Image: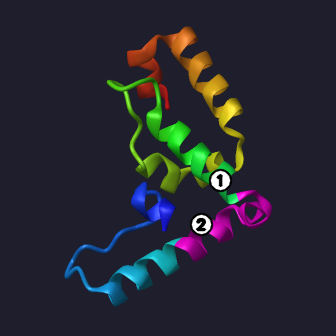
Amino acid sequence: PTLVKLWVLPRDMSNGADDKFAAAATKGERELLAKVPQLLRLPTLQIIESAKTVKEGFGPHQRLPPALLRSEPMLLAFPPLYIRGGLDYLSNTYGVDNAVKQS
């Protein structure tokens, strides 16, 4: 449910029906785990923190879209500290505006 709240997993808003919501989330979970099966063995809190770290991106004015995690779910398997280090590297190397374009 937390990854749905973070918009990493899909949220079916077509009718607001719980069954459509559950079906979309379940399908999204299966697709996510098929791409990154190691998520099953990682602590849930680490995955959530990784998702939050990616979404925070380069700060309050340069957030990254949840679609990035849907297209590159492997990011969820990295510890938040490594993600922050990668974002800092991009920011320092390319500048924030250019780093957002590179990511």
Q: Residue 3 at x, y = what percent?
A: 50, 60
At a point 36% along the width and 80% down the height, the residue shown is 21
Q: Main secondary structure of the magenta part?
A: helix
Give the magenta part as a residue range.
Answer: 29-43
28 vs 84, left or right, is left
- Quarter of the figure with residue 44: bottom right
Amino acid bearing label 2 = Leu
Mark 2, residue position: 32
Q: Amino acid at mark 1?
A: Leu
Quadrant in the rendering for residue 56: top left
Q: Position of residue 68 (x, y in %)?
A: 47, 46
Task: Say which residue label 1 marks.
Answer: 45
Indicate the colouring scheme: rainbow
In reply to whether residue 39 is colored magenta, the answer given is yes
The residue depicted at 45 percent of the width and 24 percent of the height is 58
Secondary structure beneath disc 2?
Answer: helix
Residue placed at 65% from the left, 53% from the top? 45
Name the residue located 66 percent from the left edge and 23 percent from the top edge: 85
In terms of depth relative to the viewer, which is nearer, 26 or 72? 26
Res. 36 mark:
none
Mark nearest the camera among 1 and 2 is 1
Is residue 16 highlighted in magenta? Answer: no
Image position, residue 30 (x, y; %)? 59, 76
